[in-house]
Amino acid sequence: MPKIVVLVSGSGSNLQSIIDAINHDELDCNIAGVIADRECYGLTRAKEAGIPAYIVDRKIHRERLSEEIDKLIPSGTSLIVLAGFLSILDNAFIDKWQNRIINIHPSLLPKFGGHGMWGNRVHEAVLASGETESGCTVHMVTSEIDCGQIIVQQKVPVLMDDTVESLRLRVQETEHSAMLAAIRKILEK
Ligand code: GRF
């Protein structure tokens, strides 16, 4: 059974969809650990599911943070999933786990990605630009933020009367299935 590790910083709804899919035999892997860079609800979800849950201090230097995270990842881990993880991992970490780290982003990359584009800022920018569609992207993590190979993308319409919150919720619904599709795609390779 392939082992995956999930990194979180927020509510952990993507983590929850992975946990649920495993419990319903819809995803063939084990979550070997959940690592958070701050106290967050994602950590609580991991603990409630009986998954080893760790917290690392994001205020330490970026290099040390990546080293600390690396120490918590068991050897033989097939995939590291950044599910709303907000710290930046360093190049040594990304090189070591090359092609085995994926991230989910709440826009149709390469649009609305890059440094500082996270959370509601993404949806604000989409609404301000007058785009008629948005969505989510699961992509490989490389040293350039939000630029790695796209694995799965799912689109949603942007509606005339959308607010940041209504668009965020519509995109979030697609994230959960996009994330599962991407994990399957990689683990089945
Ligand atoms: C998602 O919108 C994801 O695209 C972004 O962070 C958010 C995480 O949500 N990278 P959750 O913590 O999984 O609920």
Image (cartoon, helix red, strand yellow):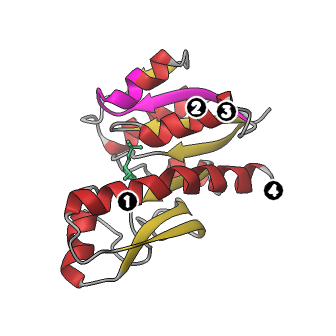
Q: Disc 3, disc 1: CB below 8 Å?
A: no
Q: Which residue is mark 2?
A: 19
Amino acid carrying label 4: it is Lys
Residue 11 falls in which quadrant of the image? top left
Q: Disc 4, disc 3: CB below 8 Å?
A: no
Q: Which residue is mark 4?
A: 189
Q: Which mark is residue 170?
A: 1
Residue 124 position within the rendered picture, expressed as x and y whole percent measured from the top left: 20, 68
Q: Is residue 73 visible?
A: yes
The relative height of residue 161 versus residue 143 in the rendered view (above or below) is below
Q: Earlier in the sequence, mark 4 or mark 1?
A: 1
Amino acid carrying label 3: it is Ile
Query: Badge 3, how many Cα within 10 Å: few under 14, some, many 20+?
Result: some
Q: CA distance from mark 2 to mark 3?
A: 5 Å
Q: Which residue is mark 3?
A: 22
Residue 87 position within the rendered picture, expressed as x and y whole percent measured from the top left: 34, 46
What residue range appears in magenta? 29-44
The relative height of residue 78 versus residue 32 in the rendered view (above or below) is below
Amino acid carrying label 1: it is Arg
Asked which secondary structure carries label 3, the reply is helix
Q: Disc 2, disc 3: CB below 8 Å?
A: yes
Q: Residue at x 40, y 25 (%)?
A: 43
Asked which secondary structure carries label 2, the reply is helix
Answer with left or right where residue 175 lies relative to residue 43: right
Q: Earlier in the sequence, mark 3 or mark 1?
A: 3
